[in-house]
Amino acid sequence: MKLPYAEPYKIKMVEPIRVSTREDREQWIRDAKYNLFMLKSDQVFIDLLTDSGTGAMSDRQWSAMMLGDESYAGASSYFNMKSAIKDILGFDYFLPTHQGRAAENVLFSTIVKKGDIIPGNSHFDTTKGHIEYRQAYAPDCTIDAAADTQLEIPFKGEMDLNKLEKILKETPKEKIPCVVLTVTNNTAGGQPVSMKNIRETSELCRKYGITLLLDSARFAENAYFIKTREEGYADKSIKEIVREMYSYADVMTMSSKKDAIVNMGGFVAFKSEELWRKCQMFCIMNEGYITYGGMSGRDMNALAQGLDEGTEFDTLDARIRQVAYLGSKLDEYGIPYQRPAGGHAIFVDAKQILTNVPKEQFIAQTLGIELYLEAGIRGVEIGAILADRDPDTRENRYPRLELLRLAIPRRTYTNNHMDVVAAALANVKERAASINKGFVITHELPVMRHFTVELERAK
Ligand SMILES: *Cc1c(COP(=O)(O)O)cnc(C)c1O
C-alpha cells in the first residue's frame, strides 16, 4: 500500500486556543462593531486573518534567537543574515528593515519621484501605497486570465509582457525607476509566476535599461510552484530555482514575515553597490543603522535560519499541500473559491454563496461574520469595504469580486483545523438562502477604512 502523506516535523510546544459558544461570539462580534480586525485574538478559535508573522518558528530558529548579538553596529547576527542572503538569494548588498513595507519605503524614498511610472503584476497594497503617496503611478500589467476565478492555469500571477512593453516603449526611461514583479502574486490570490515569465520580464527590462525589482514575500512558494509545475525544473532543488529566479533581478524587497517564517522583519537587497549606498540614508533615517535597520539581533538570527528552512522542499511541500487540502475539502462541499488553490490562502467567492445579500451591504464581510459566528473562524474581507471610496466622488467602489480570504499560517494548524473550516463554511452555505441582510457602516476613516471600520446589521 502507498503510505499517506505526513508532515516532516513534530510539535514541541503548543499554544491553547479557546473554543467558544455561538452566544459568546454574537456578543463579541457585536462589541467589535462587526469588524473582524477588532476582535481580541482569544475570541478566535482558528485565526486565518493573515499568514504574515503568524507562522511557527522551529527549534533551530528559537535557539538562533538565544545567540542573537544585540551590538548596535557590526553584530554577528547581521553577518549571519548577510551570509544567508548571499548564499540563498545571491545578493551582495542588503539593508535590514523592520518589515516589508519599510523595505519599500527605504527603496522608493531613494528612487521614486513625482510623476514616475512603476509597472507591475498586481502591486501589493503597501507597494502601491508607497508609489501613489509619492504621486507616481502603478499601472497593472497582470495577465487577463488572473481575473477569471474558475480558470485553472499553472501560472496565473504572471506579467503580461505586451502590456509591459507598451509602457516601456511609450515612457521616457528616466520616468521608470523600476518594474515590480511580485512573486507569488498576492493580490491575484497567491498565484505563481513561471521562471519563463521572470526571465522574459527581465529581458524586457534589460532591453529598455530598466531596473527589475522582485517583491519577494513569497518567493519560496513561487519556487515550489516552478519545481512542481514548470517543465525542466522537477529535478532542481528549491535553492537552485531560487538562485536562478534572482539571477534575473536587480533588487528585491522582502517581507520576512512570510517565507522567512519570522514574526517580524524584512530587508531590501541589491546587486548594485551604488544603489545600496544611496539607500543607506533613508535606512538610517527611518529604520536604524545599516547593520540592524529596525531589527534586533535575535530577530536577524531567526530570519537567517528561517530563510534556509523556508527554501527547503519539505517545508514548502507541507505548507502548500495544506492549502490545497483545504481547497479539496471545499470542493467536496461545493464551495466556490478562486482556482487553483494558491500558495498561502484560499479566496472564497462570497457572491456565489450569499446570493441574497445586496452588494451595498458588503457580501464578503457578511460571509466573514457568518463564518465567525458559526465556528469562531476569522478570515478577512477582500471586497467593497477594502476597495474603499472613490477619491473624487466619495462613492463606495464595488469590485467585481467579493472574496473572503482564508490565509493559512505556516506550520501552525493541523488538517483537523482545515476540516473544521470547510465544514463551518458548508454550514453557512446550507443556510445561505435565509441570509438576506448584510451590514451598514456607522464609522469609517477617509483611507484604509477596513482596519477600523464600524458596522451594524442592516435593518
Ligand atoms: C506582506 C507583503 C508586503 C508588505 O510586507 P509587510 O511585512 O507586511 O510590511 C509587500 N509585498 C507583498 C507581496 C506582501 O505579501
Image (cartoon, rainbow, N blue to C red):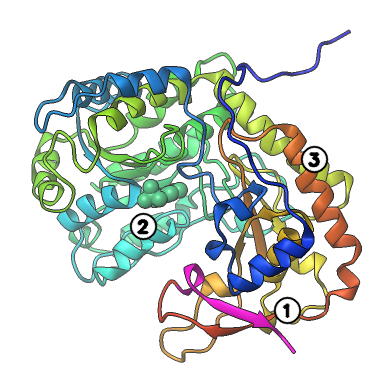
The answer to whether mark 2 is within 8 Å of ligand 1 is: yes
Magenta stretch holds residue 258: no
Above or below: residue 54 compared with residue 2? below
Q: Which residues are magenta?
A: 449-459
Please tell me whether mark 1 sits on a helix, a strand or a loop. loop
Identity, as a three-letter code, of the amino acid under mark 1? Gly
Q: Which residue is mark 3?
A: 419
Q: How far is disc 1 from disc 2 in space, using C-alphas?
A: 31 Å
Of residues 167 and 239, the one nearer the viewer is: 239
Q: Tell me the residue that label 2 is attached to.
A: 127
Of mark 1 and mark 2, the one earlier in the sequence is 2
Name the quadrant of the N terminus.
top right
Residue kind at label 2, given as amino acid type: Thr
Q: Please, is residue 294 above or below residue 41 in the view? A: above
Q: CA distance from mark 3 to mark 1?
A: 26 Å
* Disc 1 target residue: 438
Q: Which residue shows up at 12% across the image and 28% down it?
A: 71
Q: Earlier in the sequence, mark 3 or mark 1?
A: 3
Q: Quadrant of the C terminus?
A: bottom right
Image quadrant where residue 296 sits: top left
Q: Position of residue 39 (x, y in %)?
A: 57, 61
- For mark 3, give the secondary structure: helix
